[in-house]
Amino acid sequence: MSSLHPHAKPNAEQLKSMRSWVLFEKLSDAQYKDLQQSLKYQPLSPGETLFSQGDPVTYFYFVHTGQIKLTRLSKEGHEKVFEIVRDQQTFAEALMFSRQPRYPVNAQAITETRVIAINAHAYLRILEKSTQACFTIMASMSQKLHAKVNEIDRLTLHNATYRLACWISDNVTQQDMQADIQLSTPKNVIASQLSIKPETFSRTLKRLETEGLIKVHGNQIAITDIQQLRNSITAERL
């Protein structure tokens, strides 16, 4: 397990990057300056654990660069990926509102990762004095809850092809009819998040390719017609 270095502080560039995130952009300059006193900077190597399931909650986290997977292990030792947190995102912030909170999952770096740890008690003190900050975090948590409900819907009510097609669509940032996705996350980790076996993941990619919706070149997925893909998802023709 990784340990936070007591004197490791984020630099000016990292602070500026975090400042623009939704949970911090509404804070006054004075509030953000106060919060900086409690921040810790943590570099992580691939495979390094940030915290384990059952550890007491002291911090929530902002991923400056890299990727973190949130997982649990079954009794048989199988890993289930619940979420992949990417750069410029936060995680574990909802836990600061729990009584005697403990992390319900394991957090492990997928790639070289840099995180900023935000002391939960320090952030709560700011919330006590800022109505606007309270509404901001409530809105953020509501959006995450809505996303989780949609994810549960996909995992329980739809097949592997539908789940993977939705994942591809969700990860397209371009507005063009054609788009490319570079798989920076290992395929077995994505498969676990989608509750698909790795071999099924590969077969499903091949099926989407056969249907002319995508083309796969190693770790790159080229979407030949993003609108056609999304129309197929909407009509549930997958």
Image (tube, helix red, strand yellow):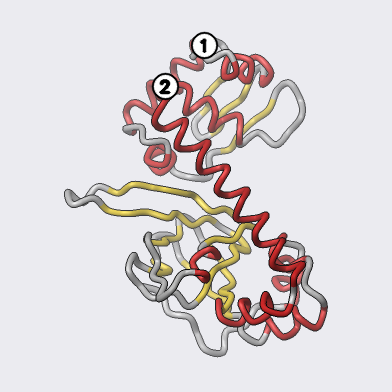
84 over 133 or under it: above or below: above
Residue 45, by quadrant, is: bottom left
Find the residue positioned furthest to the right.
Answer: 29
Q: Name the kind of residue labelled 1 in the image.
A: Arg
Comes first in the chain, label 1 or label 2: 2
51 sits left or right of 117 in the view: left
Location of mark 2 (residue): 204
Location of mark 1 (residue): 237
> Residue at horizontal 53%, vertical 70%?
60
> Residue at horizontal 66%, vertical 62%?
137
> Residue at horizontal 61%, vertical 34%?
170
As drawn, the label of residue 120 is none
| Helix, strand or loop status at disc 2 | helix
- Report the label total: 2
Residue 15, by quadrant, is: bottom right
Name the image quarter holding the N terminus.
Answer: bottom left
